[in-house]
Amino acid sequence: MRRRLLQAAALAACLPLAACTPPPELGGSFVQLWRSHLEWTPQQWRERLTATHALGCKEIFVQWAGIDGEPDNTWMAPDPLIRTLLDESAALGMGVHLGVPYDERWWTAIGAPDDASLATFLQRTGNNAARYMQQAAWPKHAAFRGWYLPYELEQYDWAIPARLDKLATWLGGMSDVAKATSGQPPAISTYFSRLPTAGTLAGMWSTLLDRVTLHPMIQDGVGVAGMSNYTALAPLHDMLLARGAPFDLVIELFEELPSEKDDGTTFNAKAADFSRVKRQWEIARHYGATRLVAFAIDPWVLDDTPGSKALLREWQAALS
């Protein structure tokens, strides 16, 4: 299976694709809320969601409903904003997966050498996420499709069995509440870390799925590592197919640019070239994912930059 997948990826990367080949069905796109969005009007959201829907998007994944962090960067999306997203999506026939509030100290917590601080972080964030899901009225909305947990999982930080056990327990508590409030397991993103470790992404997810009901969303990583990242994801992909576990494939619509630092603290990117997006589409057709989800139509296709305009123009041409 892995060899066939890699052969297909190589073929897709090398052969020219006919311009008339329509894109695969787009299951969804992420929407990242930032503090600046708190000032948007319903008309602004209507225009952006309409443009997203016009590219074939059937659902949106609101990455988080707010940010929990340092005092100067803690905010929650007010109820009228979330209601606008749900109402406008419903009017377009789109569903909404809503991310629980995100604690931005995630990377600090999982990188800390002492287990006590990690345990405190997991307990606090798990309780906060459960409280939000239990108190929110959004699952009653016609557009609501389920919960999203806005924490990205990789194999590097969870290679030690004791830490993986803590992760499974934490996810299990949130999954139980998500299913109780929405009837669906929560979705959560995962990616392949290029940092050397004894742990494997497939092994981590095999352990998690033995204990917790989750819907993994595989980030293809092409926006950072290039098309070769599908090779690193092959063991996880094969394991999920073998056990019949539903999963999504997230294609990245940006290209990361070089930065002065190489420690993950800076991020600079531009919209991807359409030729690469087409190669991602071709792999997605045969990947076996439940949904193909973009990260993200807004901003990488809808921004007012030459690259975004070119990507939008060629995407629209492929749909016609």
Image (tube, rainbow, N blue to C red):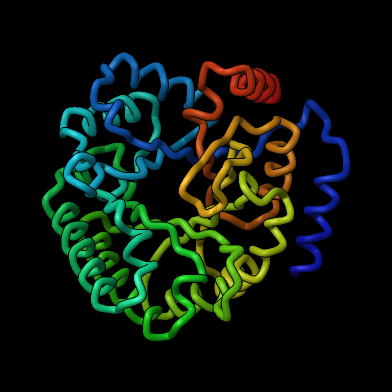
Residue 3 coordinates in the image, percent (x, y): 80, 67
Please identify the quadrant where the C terminus is shown: top right
Q: Residue at x 35, y 29 (%)?
A: 89
Q: Residue furthest bottom?
A: 161
Residue 188 coordinates in the image, percent (x, y): 41, 57
Depicted 22 relative to depicted 145: above or below: above
Please name whichever residue, 282 or 194, is drawn nearer the observer in this view of the structure.
194
Please name whichever residue, 259 or 5, is drawn nearer the observer in this view of the structure.
259
Q: Horizontally, is 288 left or right of 156 in the view? A: right
Residue 96 coordinates in the image, percent (x, y): 35, 40
Q: Report which quarter residue 55 is drawn in.
A: top right
Residue 292 coordinates in the image, percent (x, y): 56, 46
Q: Does any portion of residue 183 appear in the rendered image?
A: yes
Q: Residue at x 37, y 79 (%)?
A: 163
Q: Residue furthest right?
A: 15
Q: Residue at x 68, y 42 (%)?
A: 281
Please state the total of marks drawn on the protein image. 0
Please name whichever residue, 246 or 41, is drawn nearer the observer in this view of the structure.
41
Q: Horizontally, is 193 left or right of 135 in the view? A: right
Depicted 306 relative to depicted 57: above or below: above
Q: Residue furthest left?
A: 135
Q: Residue at x 24, y 70 (%)?
A: 173
Q: Does any portion of residue 27 appear in the rendered image?
A: no
Depicted 187 relative to depicted 312: above or below: below
Please identify the quadrant where the N terminus is shown: bottom right
